[in-house]
Image: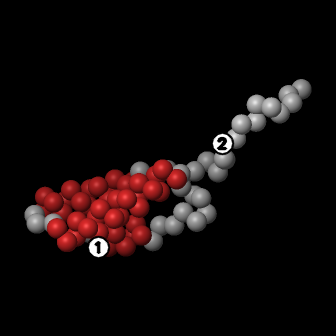
Amino acid sequence: MEKLIETAKAISNEDGKYTSDSFVALQEAIKVAESALETIETEEDLAAAIAALQSALDGLEESSGEEPTNQSWIYQN
């Protein structure tokens, strides 16, 4: 699990590659996984924590790179 946390922490969104929502979800999952490391008591707990973090990693969505704007005022020919 520690390696998976390291992998997740190495992912950056400085270039805006991922959507804000999916990147925030990953950051939250990392926090939960790090705290779970100290409280895991069974193999089932470990499997659940790994699955949650992996789900957040898998859930990263690439951004379209387009910022939503209101351009309804633009003149159309």
Q: Is residue 75 above or below residue 11?
A: above
Q: From the viewer's perspective, is 49 left or right of 30?
A: left
Can residue 57 be seen here? no
SS at mark 1 in the image: helix
Where residue 60 appears, as percent x and y from the top left, is: 45, 53
Residue beneath the point at 57% across and 50% down: 63
Q: Quadrant of residue 69?
A: top right
Where residue 58 appears, as percent x and y from the top left, is: 39, 53
Q: Residue furthest toward the left?
A: 42
Q: From the viewer's perspective, is 27 left or right of 72?
A: left
Residue type at mark 1 is Glu
Q: Quadrant of residue 52?
A: bottom left
Tag of residue 46 = none
Q: Which residue is mark 1?
A: 2
Alpha-carbon neighbours of circle 1 within 10 Å: few (<14), some, or many (≥20)?
few
Q: From the viewer's perspective, is 37 left or right of 54?
A: left
Q: Which residue is mark 2?
A: 68
SS at mark 2 in the image: loop
Q: CA distance from mark 2 to mark 1?
A: 37 Å
Q: From the viewer's perspective, is 20 left or right of 32?
A: right
Residue beneath the point at 76% across and 31% down: 72
**Residue 69 vs residue 58, the one in the foreground:** 69
For discs 2 and 1, the disc positioned in front in the rendered view: 2
Where residue 7 appears, as percent x and y from the top left, is: 39, 70
Residue beneath the point at 45% across and 71% down: 10
Residue beneath the point at 67% across and 47% down: 66
Residue type at mark 2 is Pro
Count every numbered label the image shows and give the total.
2
Alpha-carbon neighbours of circle 2 within 10 Å: few (<14), some, or many (≥20)?
few
Image quadrant where one finds the N terminus: bottom left
Identify the mark nearer the N-term, 2 or 1: 1
Image quadrant where one finds the C terminus: top right
